Amino acid sequence: MKRDLIDSYLQKPYTIEIIPEESDGLKGYFARVVELPGCMTQADDFQELETMIKDAMRAWIETSLENGLEIPEPKRIEEYSGKFLLRIPKSLHRELVHLAEREAVSLNSFITKLLARSVGMIEGESLKNYEMGKNIRRQVDSQLYIHEDKSEFGEG
């Protein structure tokens, strides 16, 4: 019965955040489950993350159940309105409006494109990582977000 309960939690769409890391010339990956505090793992190879994050989630859920702790539910996409208020300097606002006009798009569309690029969802290596991450998502059945340390649009 306990195993079935753990498996049912593992089937839920938890948010998995993956951060590429590099130290002393060695590349690796850090992954954490956003809704499960302290549920995290590291791997040298991106492909290893699938098994490692599943193992970390299983251990986290099993330990929490043994200790009578509540297991948080995944955040539903409906919890996010797609809107947020951002205060920026007037000079930056002006520059963004001018750039959007040059591109012949709305300010909202222009900023959305910039934000998507900055979190690695459009171009180059980030897209490759995002596509590889979708394979993990299919198998872990989780939402996936990739954060890059470097961004052409400023600090990430």
Image: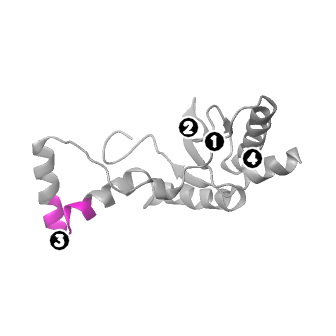
Q: Which residue is mark 2?
A: 21
Query: Residue 61: which numbered mark, if any?
Result: none
Mark 4–mark 3 distance (CA, rounded to whole Å): 45 Å
Q: Secondary structure at mark 4?
A: helix
Which comes before the other along the chain, label 3 or label 1?
Answer: 1
Mark 4–mark 1 distance (CA, rounded to whole Å): 16 Å
Mark 2–mark 1 distance (CA, rounded to whole Å): 28 Å
- Residue drawn at 13 percent across, 65 percent down: 101
The three-letter code of the residue at mark 1 reads Pro
Q: Secondary structure at mark 2?
A: strand
Q: Which residue is mark 3?
A: 104
| Depth check, front residue: 151 or 34 | 34
Callout in the foreground (4, 3) = 4
Which comes before the other along the chain, label 2 or label 4?
Answer: 2
Mark 2–mark 4 distance (CA, rounded to whole Å): 20 Å
Q: Secondary structure at mark 3?
A: loop
Q: Which residue is mark 4?
A: 54
Q: Which residue is mark 1?
A: 72
Against 99, is 147 above or below?
Answer: above
Q: Are marks 4 and 1 in contact (CB under 8 Å)?
A: no
Q: Quadrant of residue 129?
A: bottom right
The three-letter code of the residue at mark 3 reads Ala
Q: Residue 4: image x %, image y %? A: 85, 51
Which comes before the other along the chain, label 4 or label 3?
Answer: 4
Q: Is residue 147 left or right of residue 60?
A: left
Region of the chain picked out in magenta, as a range: 99-110
The three-letter code of the residue at mark 4 reads Lys
Which comes before the other along the chain, label 4 or label 1?
Answer: 4
